[in-house]
């Protein structure tokens, strides 16, 4: 039976501790002859796993790694009777590994904090406790004061107060009104509430988040891949140089070997191999703390390069909660009939416009009256209702069907109606701009984003009205999903790096085609699955927080690379000239590793970056 990783780690720690104790005893009794044996035994206890890895990788593509360099250098130190220094290299290397583990654990706790959001048991309305996985959409559940919300649901009570800090990183409580959506993972800090379950456990917000966390470390950043490639070339070169040094230097053999061993220890790529991936991993932890989940370090890294950001309108810039503003008849048909026909035509659609119209209609849909139904994506509906040909949708749909219509400057989103080829009237719907939308655009400009644009299928007047209000640079209107993709592709062909922020099913193609696709966490499942970065709450202004963390992470990773290379080059030259001891070599390797690990942890303290 194979040992699991936890058992191996515990075993290594115990053996290392025994080795360190033996090493300390050997130093205390260093004047006695037997101490060299103690040093040797302590070396075996501390370094056996490093030696084992070096031997295991000896004939593989990972042959030239830090384990091989460390093994050659320390065994060489023992051969020339530098016992104390040889074992010290391993001791300090182990301390560096321990600090790395602590840093990674800290990052994981920040990211995996979301795993604690899952609740295995749910209380039903009648007080009975059941497994969360057995609850179905439409069931009524009870969430008591202090309990975590187990499933996404619609609030049936007048109001609720929730602690959503684990989801959005905000310390302030969130107030939800009746019929508002409550996300799983929130904590009920007010009175007991009842919810109508929206989604089953596997489709809930918490399940999506957990899946993202579990897959987050698979996609490595370009910097990480670049460092890995460098190490594969760098390591064999420095080993070759180290081997040639005794033949090049015109000094005593023992001194030449000692300088060579120093050279090997200094050249060990531990600092690069450890601190660079760690820096990005810490960045992901810092982002998750703010309610932002990147599906890989590559996406966090790429966010630094974005030139243009495109925003969806409905559900991203606006709340996506349309309300019927006006019903206008341009014929003998009454307003009630116009509403009825459009509601019947829209009853199969999942679009927010359709839902709002059906809600306004407020009656049961007589499905048998609708004999034919065809939804034309981005345009509207073509149906047969009561034996009449009904077309309802945007201005372009009616014009394409040769229906004469005058398009005025009507406030909001408009759904036009034609029956048997004759224009009958329209319904206009209004949507509210999200509170943080104006600040989002302003702050993106301050961050140096060259252009912030809005993409929408809405008509020109309604789109320009919202764009002007929040300070959008360019607005593209009356777009189909494929039109949005074309705009993104054109910008990429012009050499720009682009990001798109959206939430709907029709946003998934453009999210996928962008350099960085960002989805609103409460958006459609397919949008969240397609995106590279997910905002865990319905707050697009968190895009700015994501950029802040990304830039802070990149800056600190770059600092680490500069620190490592300058130190390595300086000490390597000194080692060739005989100006370093093994202790100085250890500092140039393990010491710098520890310094860069500690520097990486500064990312957790990332505050809002200064704007340009």
Image (cartoon, rainbow, N blue to C red):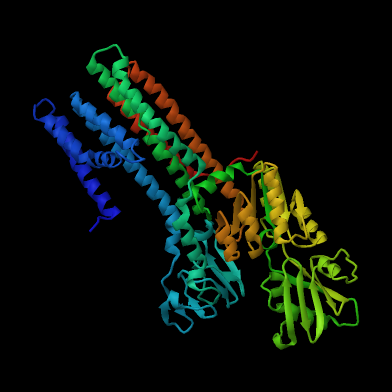
Q: Is residue 158 left or right of residue 35?
A: right
Q: Residue furthest left?
A: 33
Q: Position of residue 328 (x, y in %)?
A: 86, 75
Q: Is residue 329 left or right of residue 542?
A: right
Q: Is residue 273 left or right of residue 439?
A: left
Q: Quadrant of the C terminus?
A: top right
* Residue 165 in view here: yes
What residue sits 33% from the left and 36% below the top? 66
Where, by quadrant of the figure, is residue 573 drawn? Answer: top left
* Residue closer to the observer: 599 or 402: 402
Q: Residue furthest front?
A: 59
Please state the total of marks drawn on the protein image: 0
What residue sits 32% from the left and 24% below the top? 242
Check the image and report above or below for 93 versus 427: above
Where, by quadrant of the figure, is residue 81 drawn? Answer: top left
* Residue closer to the observer: 328 or 262: 262
* Residue closer to the observer: 294 or 179: 294
Q: Position of residue 18 (x, y in %)?
A: 18, 42
* Residue 607 in view here: no
* Residue closer to the observer: 61 or 117: 61
Where, by quadrant of the figure, is residue 24 drawn? Answer: top left
What residue sits 58% from the left and 64% below the top? 526
Q: Position of residue 258 (x, y in %)?
A: 26, 21
Check the image and report above or below for 606 versus 151: above
Q: Quadrant of the N terminus?
A: bottom left
Q: Position of residue 351 (x, y in %)?
A: 68, 70
What residue sits 19% from the left and 38% below the top? 44
């Amino acid at each position: 039976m194979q040992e699991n990783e936890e058992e191996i780690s515990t075993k290594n720690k115990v053996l290392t501790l025994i080795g360190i104790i033996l090493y300390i005893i050997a130093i205390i009794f260093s004047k006695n002859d037997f101490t060299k044996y103690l040093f040797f035994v302590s070396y075996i206890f501390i370094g056996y796993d490093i030696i084992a890895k070096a031997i295991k990788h000896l004939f593989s593509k990972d042959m030239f790694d830090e384990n091989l360099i460390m093994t050659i250098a320390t065994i060489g130190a023992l051969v020339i009777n530098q016992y104390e220094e040889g074992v010290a290299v391993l001791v300090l290397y182990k301390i560096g590994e321990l600090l790395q583990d602590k840093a990674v654990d800290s990052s994981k706790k920040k990211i995996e904090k979301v795993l604690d959001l899952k609740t295995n048991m749910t209380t039903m309305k009648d007080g009975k406790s059941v497994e969360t996985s057995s609850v179905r959409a439409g069931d009524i559940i009870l969430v008591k004061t202090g309990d975590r919300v187990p499933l996404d649901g619609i609030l049936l009570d007048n109001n609720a107060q929730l602690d959503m800090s684990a989801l959005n990183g905000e310390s302030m409580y969130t107030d939800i009104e009746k019929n508002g959506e409550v996300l799983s993972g929130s904590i009920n800090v007010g009175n007991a509430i009842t919810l109508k379950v929206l989604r089953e456990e596997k489709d809930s917000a918490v399940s999506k988040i957990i899946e993202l966390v579990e897959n987050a470390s698979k996609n490595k950043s370009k910097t990480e891949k670049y460092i890995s490639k460098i190490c594969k070339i760098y390591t064999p070169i420095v080993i070759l140089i180290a081997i040639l040094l005794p033949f090049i230097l015109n000094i005593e053999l023992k001194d030449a070997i000692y300088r060579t061993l120093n050279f090997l220890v200094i050249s060990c790529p531990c600092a690069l191999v450890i601190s660079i991936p760690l820096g990005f991993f810490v960045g992901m932890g810092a982002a998750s703390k703010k309610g932002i989940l990147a599906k890989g370090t590559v996406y966090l890294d790429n966010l630094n390069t974005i030139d243009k950001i495109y925003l969806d309108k409905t559900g991203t810039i606006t709340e996506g909660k349309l309300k019927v503003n006006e019903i206008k008849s341009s014929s003998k048909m009454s307003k009630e009939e116009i509403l009825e026909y459009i509601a019947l035509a829209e009853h199969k659609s999942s679009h927010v416009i359709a839902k709002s119209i059906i809600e306004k209609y407020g009656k049961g849909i007589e499905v048998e009256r609708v004999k034919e139904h065809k939804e034309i994506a981005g345009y509207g509906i073509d149906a047969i209702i009561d034996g009449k040909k009904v077309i309802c949708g945007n201005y372009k749909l009616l014009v394409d069907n040769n229906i004469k219509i005058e398009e005025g400057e009507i406030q909001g989103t408009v759904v036009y109606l034609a029956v048997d080829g004759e224009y009958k009237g329209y319904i206009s719907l209004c949507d509210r701009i999200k509170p943080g939308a104006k600040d989002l655009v302003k702050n993106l400009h301050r961050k140096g984003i060259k252009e912030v644009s809005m993409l929408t299928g809405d008509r020109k007047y309604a789109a320009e009205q919202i764009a002007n209000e929040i300070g959008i640079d360019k607005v593209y209107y009356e777009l189909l999903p494929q039109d949005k993709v074309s705009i993104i592709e054109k910008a990429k062909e012009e050499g720009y790096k682009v990001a798109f922020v959206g939430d709907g099913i029709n946003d998934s193609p453009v999210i996928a085609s962008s350099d960085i696709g960002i989805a609103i966490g409460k958006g459609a499942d397919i949008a969240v699955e397609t995106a590279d970065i997910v905002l865990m709450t319905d707050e697009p202004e968190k895009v700015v927080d994501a950029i802040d963390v990304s830039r802070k992470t990149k800056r600190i990773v770059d600092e680490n690379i500069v620190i490592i290379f300058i130190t390595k080059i300086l000490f390597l030259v000194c080692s060739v000239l005989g100006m370093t001891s093994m202790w100085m070599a250890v500092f140039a390797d393990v010491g710098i590793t520890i310094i860069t690990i500690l520097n990486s942890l500064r990312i957790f303290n990332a505050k809002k970056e200064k704007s340009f």
